Image (tube, rainbow, N blue to C red):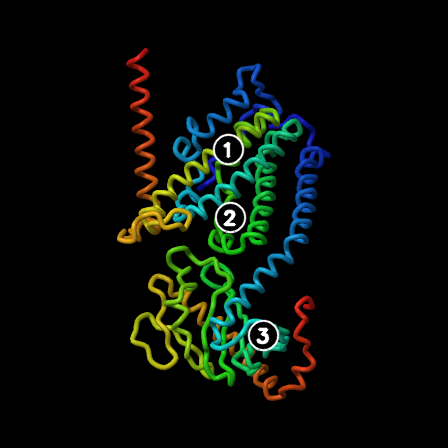
Amino acid sequence: MSEEPKQGGYISQAWLVILLALLYGGALAGVQTTLGPIIEENKKNETYSVIPELIEGAVKENTEEIDVVGENGKRQRVYKALGEDKQLKGWLLAASGQGFADKIDVLVGLNADLSTITGIYVLDQKETPGLGNFIIDPPFRDQFAGKSCLEPVQVVKAGPVDGNQIVALSGATISSESVATIVNKGIANLRGPIDKLAAEGPSEEANTPPEDPAKK
Amino acid sequence: MAEDTKPTADPEPAAEDLSPADGGPTAAERFINGILPENPVYRQLLGMCPVLAVTGGMKSAVTMAAATGFVLICSNVIVSLIRGLLKPHLRILVFTLTIATFVTIADRTLAAFLYQMSKTLGPYVPLIIVNCLIISRCEICASKQSVGVAFFDALGMALGFLLALSSLATVRELLGSGTWFDMTVLPAGWPDWGVMILPPGAFLTLGLLLGLCEWVGQIREARAKRSS
């Protein structure tokens, strides 16, 4: 359709697209460099703000961040939640995995002796609005509180539940199962290392300065 | 929500300007048209995705309209600036590239400064990229007219979009939660119509408001005919 010679035509045709792509890419890199840290900070603040909700008696100012190596060999940050009197109240760990639509980020609270889930909180999700996104609401989340972390949480389609079972959201079985799987895997991955850490006690704690959030 | 842009086969070069002197609309006409006579939602039925999805409350509706307005104005201005360089068959690509860039900027900015709102809006902010309103303005106005006209065109359309989103959100939030901008408006005895906040409420409200607009338009038309 074009009368121009094809040879050498690509650059003359597409130079504007290439130039714009480079310019826009640079601009976006600039935006990400400027805003990225603020967004990370927002996420961290949200994590801290739910610590008292997930772990009874914990004070967010007294929370310590500790990096542990999970069973999968990757370093991961866990939060050691201390109460007003600096007594260990519980542990908070972050876990994420594939949901129905996109990645789901979950925070899981465990009690001090790592035997029971004290609560979960969904930090980030893009599940179907009106169905799967109900995983962020208390009626679903609260089911996890009090479940044992020694065995995996199971999902059933309808109640009544016994033992370590929770009821799936109706119309969102996959989202519900995803959350349960993420929680189970997260606990399986980090429970052992945290237990070891807790057993080693103060020596490990001394190695980890509490004011160390900037380092990754 | 599909991008119903015309096939790129039309031979008209994008660089051909449509200046007011040649009979094209002036900046003022473009601006006024965007608000009511060619309202993007009530007249052109464009951008239905955010219209239905985020109008459960005024706050999210206004944030969405602001983000869309930002993207619309920026991309219209940029496209108008480079309109002389556009190759007709590559123009849609350039429009999309420009729009996607500004949407990403808007999305990151919301996540940095309005974190909770950005979580509430969720995927609908990135979805501004496929809002036909923006690409249609690039195609209809910005790629053919001067920067000034393109700017006022975008501003008018953005205000029209804000008007449409907030009218829907006002009805839905008032009836659904008895509030407006999260402030209690209706008396405590109001039984919240939960359905209004859910997706069916969006369809019902949009349908009724569209009908209302059409009805008012017909009455005015009839009156104009009678008086002439």
Q: Is residue B201 visible?
A: no
Identify the chain of the residue marked 2, using the numbered disc in the image: B
Q: Amino acid at mark 3?
A: Thr
Q: Residue B136 — which label?
A: 1
In this figure, which residue is indicated by the disc labeled 2?
Answer: B125
* Amino acid type at image mark 1: Ser
Q: Which quadrant is home to the C terminus of chain A?
A: bottom right
Q: Is residue B138 left or right of residue A99?
A: right
Subunit under mark 1: B
Q: Chain of mark 3?
A: A
Location of residue A80 in the rendering, given as x and y in whole percent from the top left corner: 57, 77
Tag in front: 2 or 3? 3
Q: Are marks 2 and 1 on the same chain?
A: yes
Give the total number of marks visible in the rendering.
3
The reply to whether dot 1 and dot 3 touch (C-beta < 8 Å) is no
Q: Position of residue A140 (x, y in %)?
A: 38, 68
Between residues B47 and B94, which one lies in front from this camera angle?
A: B47
Instruction: Report if residue A103 is visible in the image.
Output: yes
Task: Count residues near mark 2 (Cα–Cα under 10 Å), then give few for <14, some for 14-19, many for 20+.
Answer: many
Q: Amino acid at mark 2?
A: Val
Q: Between label 1 and label 3, give the one nearer the viewer.
A: 3
Q: Image check: B171 left or right of A51?
A: left
Classify mark 1: helix, strand or loop: helix
